[in-house]
Amino acid sequence: MIAHLNGHLAATGIDHAVIDVNGVGYLVGASAKTLAALGSLGEFVTVHTEMLVSEDSIRLMGFASADERNWFRLLTSVQGVGAKVALAILSILSPAEVQTAVARADAAMIARANGVGPKLAQRIVNELKDKAGAIALGGGGAGAAIPASGAANDAVSALLNLGFKPAEASTAVNAASDELGPTASLDALVRLALRKAAK
């Protein structure tokens, strides 16, 4: 899995950017906020990524921050929310604003995004209210262990892909990260997190 790209911003479109990494151009779907944060063409940028694999396509999504990527994962875990809708939400709301909307059950704030009706917005806040706290990165306590390590973010993603709920994945990875320390490899984190989650 590609976790991030470091390269030069080669081109941008309405909903995507092309990152040139050593002569290879990676097209990444992106929110309006990410596109604005990337800066000018030719600048060196770091983009956090999420790979979406379906029967007929493989797409790379790009994010200006790991927080935004994590909220993209959370949003797309809700039934009826695909990549396009998640990017529309993240185009008008920062990760902190999405977290606030979910915490306050403010469906109207979510519904401001293109393609998000009142019913879907309500489902998003209902389904994510319990999950959001566990994966709300940058907070104090155990959650603070995650942003320090890209491996921890990827370990959470690995557990989510195995069917764990976000809260379970974050808790298990935090516990593994605390035990192994900040230099732990992704492989070691995932193995220990799986053992902790199974207890």
Image: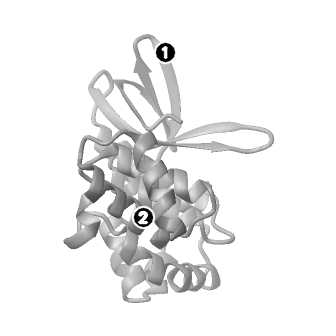
Say which amino acid is labelled 2: Ala
Q: Secondary structure at mark 1?
A: strand
The number of numbered badges drawn on the structure is 2
Say which amino acid is labelled 1: Val
Horizontally, residue 183 falls left or right of residue 86, namely left
Residue at image mark 1: 24
Residue for point 46% across, 76% down: 131
* Mark 2 in CB contact with mark 1 (< 8 angstroms): no
Residue for point 29% across, 47% down: 149
Q: Secondary structure at mark 2?
A: helix
Residue at image mark 2: 172
Determine the residue located farthest toward the left in the rendered image: 140
Q: Position of residue 197 (x, y in %)?
A: 50, 66
Residue for point 37% across, 44% down: 151
- Establish if 2 lies above or below 122: above
Q: Nearer the viewer, residue 54 or 109?
A: 54
Q: Position of residue 110 (x, y in %)?
A: 47, 76
